[in-house]
Amino acid sequence: MKHYNEELYVVPKMFDRWKLFVKMRKLAKHWMEYIGNRQQNVKADLAVAFDRWKYAHGRAENALSRRNKDYLEERALLAARRLNDLAENNNQSEYLLS
């Protein structure tokens, strides 16, 4: 009884290499389509706008995480004061209009 077969020994390696080839082919196709879409005017503009929307929260979070707490509290107080001033100005203008 023969336990070793040359053809059966090569089959798993062949399938592994074939899977790797298909994976690389799909990856290359994806990047070619990505680049092609980025070269078309309308699709490129939409892609840039979408990326700005999608990653804006992360960029803002990174910017805030680098600031110290005292600075952020001061900025929050200034923003609250500006909102109060705007509300008072709005109330005054509504009073004058009525």
Image: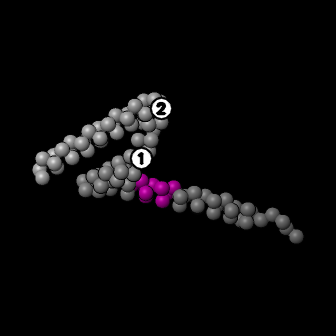
Question: In the rendered image, which quarter is residue 12 located in?
Answer: bottom right
| Local crowd size for mark 2, using a 10 Å CA cut-off: few (<14), some (14–19), many (≥20) | few
Q: In which quarter of the image is residue 21?
A: bottom right
Query: Residue visible at 40% across and 31% down?
Result: 74
Looking at the rendered structure, the number of numbered marks drawn on it comes to 2
Along the line of sight, the residue nearer the viewer: 65 or 48: 65
In the shown orientation, is residue 24 left or right of residue 29? Answer: right
Q: Residue furthest right?
A: 1
- Label annotation for residue 33: none
Task: Specify how the rendered protein is coloured.
Answer: one colour
User: Residue at 53% across / 58% down in the picture?
Assistant: 23
Tell me residue 97's x, y (percent). Answer: 11, 50
Contact? badges 2 and 1 (CB < 8 Å): no
- Decide: is 75 above or below 24: above
Type of amino acid at the residue the image marks with label 2: Lys
Compared to 63, does 6 lie above or below? below
At x 25%, y 56%, the residue is 42
Q: Which mark is residue 57?
A: 1
Which residue carries the number 2 mark?
69
Q: Distance between the residues labelled 2 and 1?
A: 19 Å
Q: Of circles 2 and 1, which is in front? A: 2
Q: Where is residue 88 in the image (x, y as percent from the top left)?
A: 24, 42
What amino acid type should be assigned to the residue bearing mark 1?
His
- In the image, 98 versus 9, the foreground residue is 98
View extreme (left): residue: 97
Q: Is residue 35 above or below residue 74?
A: below
Question: What is the quadrant of the N terminus in the image?
Answer: bottom right
